[in-house]
Image (cartoon, helix red, strand yellow):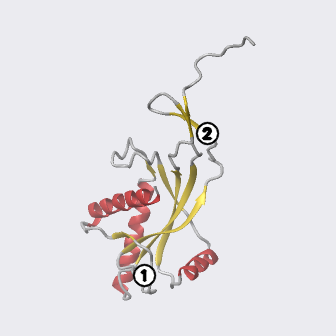
Amino acid sequence: MIELALFFLKTQLNNYLKLRTGSEDKVELIPLFDKNGKMQVSNVAMTLVNIEEERVMKNQNLYRETPQGTIAKTDPKVMVNLYVLFSANFGEDEFGYRESLKFISYVISFFQSHSLFTPGSYPDLNDQLTKLSAELFTLSLEQQNNLWGALGAKQMCSVMYKVKLLAIFDDNIKMDAPPITEANLNP
């Protein structure tokens, strides 16, 4: 589910950038560093930095109707929020820094105008994803320092978004029974 949601957002953002700049696929869904500690960001990196359970929307419905008309008992869905960091690196010189700032601005303008993703608006949204919303998540200077320190990098042009309400579930049926269609109150 997580990879489907992030790949969908990456594709939509690349399509937006193609319309705005004419450039091909500037956004990559990658970690900032490879396994040897070498920085991989060569345009715009889209990196998952945190997963948070959305406790307010905790789903305790254990029963659902199956397509066959029976009632199935399953595990409840876990609703999560994803914290996605967009980092731009177009080089160390002034031109590269200006390009990085320009592309981070494009990321912000994309999510400002495309903050809600539903199957009605985006037919290519995977049917397992019922709705995604993205909101700018502003870090304090101290939080930014801690984040970049934890990532093992020096700070670069970046912006973070909170992608809300991704439902993760295992479709494993624990019990299956026909529905109750009548009640007999006689002892």
What residue did someone put label 2 on? 61
Q: Amino acid at mark 1?
A: Asp
- x, y percent for residue 137: 55, 63
| Image position, residue 183 (x, y; %) | 65, 16
x and y percentages locating residue 187 in the rendered image = 75, 13
Could you say which disc has been placed on residue 34 in the image?
A: 1
Where, by quadrant of the figure, is residue 17 drawn? bottom left
Residue 123 or residue 37, whichever sits in front:
37
Residue 30 falls in image quadrant: bottom left
Instruction: Give the residue at the far right of this rendering.
Output: 187
Which circle marks residue 152 in the picture? Answer: none
Instruction: Spot the residue most to the front.
Output: 187
Left or right: where 4 falls relative to 23? right
Instruction: Inspect the image, locate mark 2, and give the three-letter code of the amino acid beneath it.
Output: Asn
Find numbered disc 1 in the image and state the secondary structure of the residue it sits on.
loop
In the image, 105: left or right of 145?
left
| Residue 96 against residue 49 in the figure, above or below | below
Q: Residue at x 58, y 19 (%)?
A: 181
Name the secondary structure under disc 2: loop
Q: Residues within 10 Å of mark 1 (few under 14, many from 20)?
A: few
Q: Is residue 144 above or below residue 174?
A: below
Please name the residue shown 38% across and 49% down the image: 126
Q: Position of residue 140 (x, y in %)?
A: 62, 72
